[in-house]
Image (spheres, helix red, strand yellow):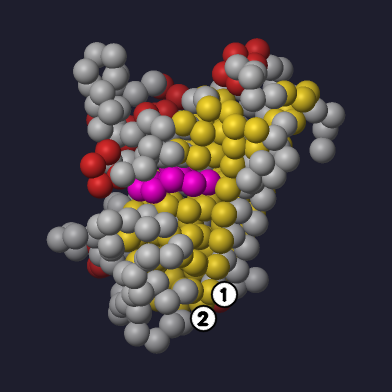
Amino acid sequence: MPEAIRITPETDLQQLFDAAAPGTAFHLEKGIYRQKVMIKTPGLTLFGDGMDETVIVFDDYANKLDENGVEYNTFRTWTVAVCADHVKMQNLAIVNDALQPETKGQEVALSVLGNDFYMEHCRLSSTQDTLFAGPLPPDLIERYQGFHRAELLSPGPSRQVYKNCLIEGSVDFIFGCGDALFEECEIRNVYDVRQVGYTAAPAHALEQEEGYLFKNCRFTCEEGVKPQSIYLARPWRDFGLCRFINCQYGPHIHPLGFDKWNDTQRDKTARFHEYPAVPGRVKWAKEMEERYIR
């Protein structure tokens, strides 16, 4: 770990990160940092005193109106947005505590659009749309020109790694087009009054060959989540790509495993793979190709 600048919850994180030189490391001391932060400086390293000790938190949500009376939309609700390459985070939490997604809409905790992002021993907590492992699908990049800041419309590529992290939410709470590895993570469903939930919502293009890979992960839930009420993934766009290797599933996971996304025909195009194969899964989910098992 490089020598780090120690900071406290009273620090203005946005001002500090904007002024930092590339490659700077920061130690966020324990406490609650109620701030909304966009990281635009490459190579920053952030580490805290533990995923329950150092917490960056905010409470924006999709149906909230901005100063012009315009709804925030999903992609402005982040607590932290990483829009620079080679950023690393360890031993901290990023939270969106807006709650009540059934009326407030999506509530992103972390958005990642930079390349070579690494996170370890961290907690990401929200409800609907907790982690945007971007970038956006091309049609939304075009749609939001002039509405979202340019940093949020990067087309990628974006390669991301999450190791030994806790990621919790209720609906589509890991979503986007990034190539992301989730290794030895706990993926936890929180209670949602709508009852049915979905973990991943991939939107990868056909030419992408990595997508989301969940390796040796545990899929758990908090009290109140109904048995067999949660699907592992549903494709947000036609060719969404998810792979699950040697994962452990709690009783909240639906036996079919996957959903095709409402009234679409994405069951004919989505790329969902699992190893070892689980009896009873939807027929369009495939057993993992041998080259990915290592």
Q: Quick check: can you spot residue 205?
A: no
Give the class, few, some or many, for how many residues have Cα within 10 Å of label 1's Cα (few <14, many ≥20). Answer: some
- Image quadrant of residue 140? top left
Residue labelled with disc 2: 276
Residue 126 on image: x %, y %: 43, 45
Answer with the quarter of the image where residue 231 lies: bottom left
Where is residue 201? Give x, y as percent. Answer: 36, 54
Mark 2 element type: loop
**Nearer-the-camera pick, 208 or 161:** 161
Q: Position of residue 217 (x, y in %)?
A: 57, 66
Quadrant location of the C terminus in the rendered image: bottom right
What is the count of numbered marks? 2
Residue 91 appears left or right of 97: right
Instruction: Pinpoint residue 272: horizontal percent, then vertical percent.
Output: 39, 67
Say which mark, if any, is on residue 149.
Answer: none
Is residue 275 in view from this perspective? yes
20 to the left or right of 101: right
* Residue type indicated by callout 1: Asn
Relative to 239, say whether 65 is above or below.
above
Residue drawn at x 28%, y 41% as measured from the top left: 105
Question: Mark 1 and 2 residues: CB-CB less than 8 Å, in contact?
Answer: yes
Residue type for callout 2: Pro
- Please give the name of the residue rendered at 77% of the width and 25% of the height, measured from the top-left corner: 6
Toward the bottom, the furthest residue is 279
Q: Secondary structure at mark 1?
A: loop
Cα–Cα span, label 1 and label 2: 7 Å
Magenta region? 124-133
Q: Residue at x 45, y 38 (%)?
A: 96
Q: Which mark is residue 246?
A: 1
Which residue does the image show at 56% across and 25% down from the upper left? 39
Q: Earlier in the sequence, mark 1 or mark 2?
A: 1
Extreme residue toward the left, this view: 263
